Image (cartoon, rainbow, N blue to C red):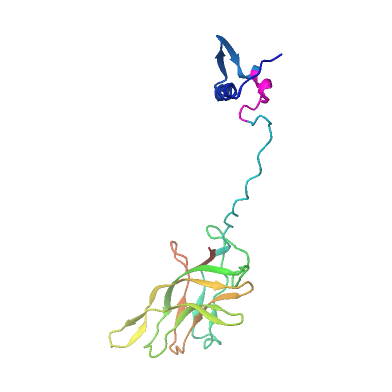
Amino acid sequence: MFKKITVATFIVITSFLSLGAFEVQGKLIDNQALGPILGYDEGCHSCSPQNVPGPTGPTGPAGVASAIGFSGSLNDFTLSSGDPTFEEPIQLSGFSTADPFYPGLGFDGTNFIVPVTGRYAVKITINYELTAGVGTVTASSPAFVLQRVSAPATNLLAGSIPKTLNTTGGITLSPAGEVVLTGDVFLRAGDVIGLFFQPDGLSSAFEFNLTADPFTPGVVWSMHTIN
């Protein structure tokens, strides 16, 4: 029969259990031998005497979802004042999402159909070269424009073609340059987004060549969701 163990003795004993063994009256007592007396499981020295698990903690917050978006390049595209529909905005099409760029839900190489309502970061870089001369530009201000073509139709971002002062004092379009469109926009699921060139009344004969060189893509268009 076991002797009674006082509360004080119990506290002392349990405080030493984590050491694996302790000495009582000159004898080394292993905690595995004492465990059954106190109600401890031999394989669980940190459990409560009743060996009852505690309540489940609250569920943590949801993790951040992966961003939705795409990145595409356009390496061969020509805009010419000789096109029959030149007076209207001309949509850039045929974007490639091959490596190192990447495809994304809703992008078909021409339009981006927004898959999820939310805020989107946009960055578009357009490198162009005039392969046919442009005369003096007056009131027109041709530009590249990111549009929501679905209702309500809206110009989201725009970047004008750079202009330069020629030797006769007239203003012409820069023969080569870069146009950058960047910004954050709020879009709704189902919105249809496209990239366009708007002549804005430009009447001079010209031809834009968006063909890439070995180091720089002609056009890079990327969009992705932001928190």
Q: Where is 104 relative to 91, above or below? A: above
> Which quarter of the picture shows residue 45?
top right
Quadrant (top left/top right/bottom left/bottom right) for the N terminus: top right
Q: Residue at the location (61% across, 30% down)?
A: 46
Q: How far from the left and from the top, in percent, is residue 178? A: 41, 72
Q: Is residue 102 visible?
A: yes
Side of 149 where 142 appears, left or right:
left
Side of 90 where 140 appears, left or right:
left
Q: How far from the left and from the top, in percent, is residue 38? A: 66, 23
Task: Please say whether residue 44 is one of the residues in the magenta stretch.
Answer: yes
**Which region of the structure is painted magenta?**
34-46
| Closer-to-camera residue (123/186) | 186
Q: Residue at the location (68% across, 20% down)?
A: 37
Q: How far from the left and from the top, in percent, is residue 161? A: 41, 79
Side of 16 where 137 appears, left or right:
left
Q: Where is 58 relative to 116, above or below? A: above
| Closer-to-camera residue (16/226) | 16
Farthest top residue? Answer: 26
